[in-house]
Image (cartoon, rainbow, N blue to C red):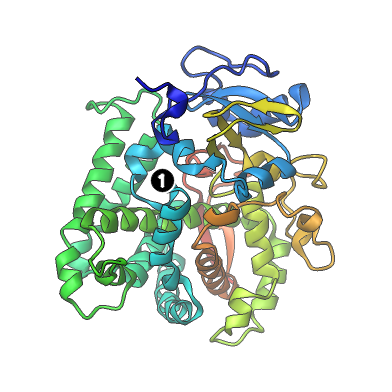
């Protein structure tokens, strides 16, 4: 029998002996997970103050090395040593939910599969998406304004799922069943955080897996139809793409990629848009400034405006995802032993980079808990003190493939809202609201707001 160290890294168990490090594990089994879900800033702030930028912690059922410094974030996310496996980092948390997606593929395999998606986010495709998105956004914002109030989180999620279908997956509206699809995505993400990980009815984990199974069947059942169609959407592109041997990619791979892509295309931006509306409703002066700015823009925005200029709306987007990043933490697992910050990290050890705390490190950010979009202005450029002090989209080979698409969605949506309306809370004395932090940040009551004509 071969020793464990001779096995491929994917087959080796995780190292759980971190006794040589400072830190604390918390309760048996759950560790510090409940504290992280309740208040991640307080938890990671305690570890930073008590143990410094490298410590040990138990979260998500794993004994992890906690890394709280931009230098260490850069080391792990850039992964120039090819020593920090994303596949094994997320395996214990998301393997059942994202198997086959980009987040579960390492190195050469990841490069090949990322290449399948890459053309879907190049300038020609993005220009086409922008025109489709604007039509949907215009109609939806008018519908919101006609109501006394709306639950913004629910409405923006519906809008962005509509957009994801119109852009990435052209499917007849009778086949979409959006409420069931939306619920499946919600169940899947909540299931991934389930403490009791049993595929048994009654548990969040089981409900999440049922959601995942429904979504995968939905896409699998459409593959042959898409392959035979003349459609030019991303789903059809995946179905018709061939590998180096001239064969179609496996149906399971295509379905896995579509589940991951559709989730990333709407769920993460739902959170960013909701939290931006939450902060904007608290700052009427900022809304007025933004309304004046977008009021001078032409009806059809240039590619430069959408993707390259740092305008007022983009600063709001950047500050929102600084305070509330769509991916709050990054998990990886070492392949070989290494050293970080003078601390020995054994092979097969889980490491955690909490982007949500690095974005608020008091040594790097001025008034880190304050919502201040101007910190991203060209004059201040506070985020440029270190390339990895602001990492909402990750970094390195796994940097979010849809980051420009998310930026476009945000800009086109809020340009339409703020050019005609003022965002107000639908409840008096609403701010500050109680927030849910995982899997994505949002007010617990889904942010009731009204749009008032300017």
Give x and y (percent) for residue 429: 62, 43
Left or right: 129 in relation to 323: left
Give x and y (percent) for residue 1: 34, 19
Q: Nearer the viewer, residue 91 or 235?
A: 91
The answer, for residue 198, to whether it is visible in the render is yes
Question: Looking at the image, which residue is at 72% across and 70% down?
Answer: 289
User: Which quarter of the figure has residue 195?
Assistant: top left
Regarding mark 1 in the picture, which secondary structure is present there? helix
Left or right: 371 in relation to 428: right
Give x and y (percent) for residue 131: 44, 81
The answer, for residue 436, to whether it is visible in the render is no
Question: Looking at the image, which residue is at 23% across and 66% down?
Answer: 248
Q: Nearer the viewer, residue 307 or 179?
A: 307
Give x and y (percent) for residue 410: 54, 65
Q: Is residue 185 above or below residue 335?
A: below
Question: Looking at the image, which residue is at 70% across and 57% down?
Answer: 283
Number of on-image labels:
1
The residue that label 1 is drawn on is 104
Left or right: 305 in relation to 96: right
Outermost residue, top direction?
28
């Amino acid at each position: 029998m071969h020793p464990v160290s001779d096995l491929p890294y994917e087959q080796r168990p995780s190292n759980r002996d971190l006794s040589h490090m400072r830190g604390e594990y918390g309760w048996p089994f759950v560790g510090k997970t409940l504290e992280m879900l309740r208040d991640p800033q307080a938890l990671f702030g305690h570890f930073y103050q008590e143990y410094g930028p490298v410590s040990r912690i138990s979260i998500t059922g794993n004994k992890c090395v906690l890394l709280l410094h931009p230098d260490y974030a850069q080391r792990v996310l850039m992964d120039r040593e090819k020593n920090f496996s994303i596949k094994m980092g997320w395996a214990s948390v998301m393997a059942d939910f994202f198997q086959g997606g980009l987040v579960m593929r390492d190195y050469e395999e990841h490069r090949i599969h990322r290449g399948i998606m890459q053309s879907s986010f190049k300038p020609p495709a993005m220009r086409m998406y922008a025109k489709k998105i604007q039509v949907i956004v215009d109609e939806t914002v008018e519908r919101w304004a006609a109501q006394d109030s709306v639950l913004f989180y629910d409405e923006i999620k519906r809008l962005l799922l509509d957009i994801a279908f119109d852009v990435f997956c052209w499917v007849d509206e009778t086949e979409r069943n959006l409420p069931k699809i939306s619920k499946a995505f919600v169940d899947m993400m909540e299931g991934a955080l389930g403490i009791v990980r049993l595929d048994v009815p009654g548990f969040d984990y089981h409900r999440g897996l049922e959601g995942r199974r429904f979504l995968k069947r939905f896409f699998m059942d459409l593959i042959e139809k898409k392959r035979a169609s003349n459609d030019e959407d991303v789903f059809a592109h995946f179905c018709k793409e061939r590998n180096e041997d001239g064969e179609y990619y496996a149906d399971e791979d295509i379905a896995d990629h579509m589940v991951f892509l559709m989730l990333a295309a709407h769920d993460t931006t739902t959170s960013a848009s909701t939290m931006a509306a939450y902060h904007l409703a608290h700052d009427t002066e900022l809304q007025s400034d933004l309304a004046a700015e977008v009021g001078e823009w032409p009806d059809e925005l240039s590619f430069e405006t959408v993707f390259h200029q740092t305008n007022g709306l983009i600063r709001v987007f950047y500050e929102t995802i600084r305070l509330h990043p769509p991916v709050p933490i990054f998990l990886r697992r070492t392949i070989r032993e290494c050293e970080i910050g003078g601390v020995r990290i054994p092979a097969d050890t889980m490491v955690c980079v909490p982007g949500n705390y690095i974005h608020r490190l008091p040594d790097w950010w001025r008034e880190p808990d304050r919502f201040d979009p101007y910190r991203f202005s060209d004059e201040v450029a506070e985020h440029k003190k270190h390339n990895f002090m602001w990492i909402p989209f990750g970094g390195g080979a796994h940097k979010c493939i849809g980051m420009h698409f998310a930026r476009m969605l945000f800009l086109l949506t809020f340009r339409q809202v703020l050019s005609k309306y003022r965002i107000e809370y639908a409840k008096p004395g609403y701010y500050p609201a109680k927030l849910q932090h995982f899997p994505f940040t949002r007010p617990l009551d889904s942010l009731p707001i009204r749009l008032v004509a300017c």
